[in-house]
Image: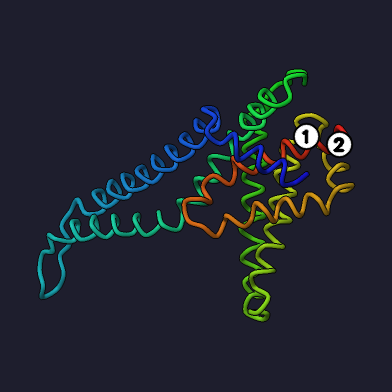
């Protein structure tokens, strides 16, 4: 069941609706990083309007240029670490569209439902990211104490978190929050294993950018299989 759901999701990745979500997420991420750099340049320009005068050295005219180049280097470094989580966060805002595309392609008999309100989706996305980051930061302690079990801890933890959140995301569209929680509790083992499958590509650069889309699509199939049974 899990592999069937995964391969169906994988086969639909070229879908223009999936690609639209991916490129919008990446585009908004790049725009955010550019805005961060532009904001830092404006702040540096404002702070260095008047030349700095130091004792003995005298007037310092090169500080603004140094800070400008330094801010560029900082943004480049930050982008290496922030690109994936920020892109995942932004992409997650559009995952309702992914679930809808899967249902239209594979389950056309389902009745149409209104899309999740943007504010509600944003709240759930930020909450999920917060839990994901917090749990992985705390897990660092376990990695140090139990280095031989680090890989198992990473996949087990992120498998649980990804499975919990993606299943909740797609299930509550059809059965509400309470219904989604009840289904998740009844099929926790299966959902955890599917989450572990989603956690594996997280360790591969660039590939991990498609995990939100692949996860939402996989768990849409999994929910339909579980719900119909």
Mark nearer the N terminus (2 vs 1): 1
C-beta proximity under 8 Å, tags 2 and 1: yes
Tell me which residue sits at (23%, 57%) in the image: 69
Q: In this view of the protein, which residue sits in the foreground, 72 or 2?
A: 2
Q: Secondary structure at mark 2?
A: helix
The one nearer the camera, 60 or 103, is 103
Residue beneath label 2, please?
A: 179
Q: Residue at x 45, y 58 (%)?
A: 81
- Sort mark 1 into few (<14), some (14-19) or many (20+) by Cα contacts within 10 Å: some
Q: Residue at x 66, y 48 (%)?
A: 128
User: Looking at the rendered structure, which numbered label has been put on residue 172?
Assistant: 1
State the image quarter where residue 151 is shown: bottom right
Please indicate whether residue 158 sits to the left or right of residue 79 in the image: right
Tell me the element at label 1.
helix
Where residue 223 appears, as percent x and y from the top left, is 78, 37
Q: Position of residue 106 (x, y in %)?
A: 70, 26
Quadrant of the image containing the C terminus: top right
Quarter where residue 58 is shown: bottom left
Which residue is painted at 83% across and 45% down in the image?
184
């Amino acid at each position: 069941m899990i592999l069937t759901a995964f391969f169906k999701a994988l086969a639909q990745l070229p879908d223009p609706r999936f690609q639209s979500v991916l490129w919008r997420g990446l585009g908004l991420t790049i725009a955010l990083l550019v805005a961060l750099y532009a904001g830092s340049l404006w702040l540096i320009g404002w702070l260095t309007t008047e030349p700095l005068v130091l004792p003995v050295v005298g007037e310092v005219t090169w500080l603004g240029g140094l800070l400008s180049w330094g801010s560029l280097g900082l943004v480049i470094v930050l982008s290496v670490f922030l690109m994936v989580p920020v892109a995942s966060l932004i992409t997650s805002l559009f995952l309702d569209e992914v679930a809808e595309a899967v249902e239209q392609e594979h389950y056309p008999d389902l009745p149409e439902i209104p899309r999740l309100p943007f504010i509600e989706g944003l709240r759930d996305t930020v909450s999920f990211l917060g839990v994901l980051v917090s749990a992985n930061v705390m897990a660092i302690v376990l990695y140090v104490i139990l280095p031989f079990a680090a890989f198992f801890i990473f996949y087990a933890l992120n498998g649980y978190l990804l499975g919990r959140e993606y299943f909740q995301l797609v299930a509550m569209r059809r059965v509400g929050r309470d219904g989604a929680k009840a289904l998740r509790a009844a099929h926790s083992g299966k959902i955890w294993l599917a989450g572990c499958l989603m956690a594996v590509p997280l360790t591969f650069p660039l590939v991990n950018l498609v995990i939100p889309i692949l996860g939402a699509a996989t768990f849409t199939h999994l929910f339909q299989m579980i719900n119909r049974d």
